[in-house]
Amino acid sequence: DAKTTQPPSMDCAEGRAANLPCNHSTISGNEYVYWYRQIHSQGPQYIIHGLKNNETNEMASLIITEDRKSSTLILPHATLRDTAVYYCIVRVKNTSGTYKYIFGTGTRLKVLA
Amino acid sequence: DAGVIQSPRHEVTEMGQEVTLRCKPISGHDYLFWYRQTMMRGLELLIYFNNNVPIDDSGMPEDRFSAKMPNASFSTLKIQPSEPRDSAVYFCASSLIFYGRTGELFFGEGSRLTVL
């Protein structure tokens, strides 16, 4: 199974861009990268996902390197409400043809006023 | 949509007692996942179902843990007998995965279990 590696914690000034890196060097060609965040002990919430191309939505941008071994989640203008644990996840396809989501240890992002 | 619904939200029990956690996935979703979250081990995948069929239970820690999905709208995770080390937040999540879909995982609010 592909696994992800993230820095345990990061700080970011309010209003600045937060760039959260993730290493997934063992990812396979058809495995998607997802990003989720968890605020306090709530259930994790979906942010964005991608396969090969860079992606952008109303919440964030996802930059995936050409070799797909790493990616970066970008929160363009971080606010205090973005303080959370951010998880980089690989969706793995099993030999059975079914899928599962493997969570890493996450990055605890603290946005500073 | 009501989202993924879990019950109970909080459970406090004594060692040796049976614990049953319940989950109602989002209607129409074909995957259901059970995760456990602790400070030490983070989010661990325990078991998942596809179209009500258990696919991979390799994450279930011991035989004391069992999970069922009798129909598309209900799943249970049972611990019998419970032990203090089972104390954790248990999350249920569901997803709809086929070509063209994001396959986004929708999580419930979790069931916080404390075993004394």
Image: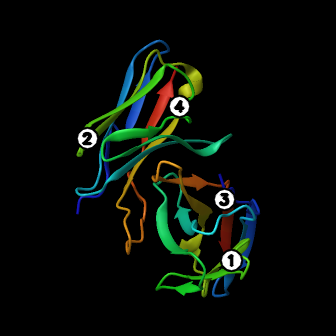
Mark 1–mark 3 distance (CA, rounded to whole Å): 13 Å
Give the amino acid at mark 4.
Met
Q: Secondary structure at mark 3?
A: loop
Query: Which chain does the numbered disc 2 sit on?
Result: B
Whole-angstrom CA distance, mark 4 to mark 1, is 32 Å
Nearer to us in this view, B27 or A10:
B27
Whether labels 3 and 4 belong to a single chain: the reply is: no
Q: CA distance from mark 3 to mark 4?
A: 22 Å
The disc labelled 1 sits on which kind of residue?
A: Thr
Looking at the image, residue B45 lies above or below residue B64: below
Q: CA distance from mark 3 to mark 2?
A: 29 Å
Chain identity of mark 1: A
Q: Position of residue A70 (x, y in %)?
A: 73, 72
Which-is-in-front pick, marks 4 and 1?
Answer: 4
Q: Residues within 10 Å of mark 3 (few under 14, many from 20)?
A: many
- Element carrying mark 1: strand
The quadrant where residue B7 appears: top left
The residue positioned 59% from the left and 61% from the top of the image is A89
Q: Is residue B91 above or below residue B16?
A: below
Q: Label 2, secondary structure: give it.
A: strand
Q: Look at mark 4 in the image and give the residue it sits on.
A: B60
Dot in front, 3 or 2: 2
Q: Mark 4 — on which chain does it sit?
A: B
Provide residue A24's location: percent of width, then percent of height. 71, 64
Chain letter of disc 3 in the image:
A
Residue B113, x across and y down, in percent: 46, 32
Q: Earlier in the sequence, mark 1 or mark 3?
A: 1
Disc 1 designates what residue? A72
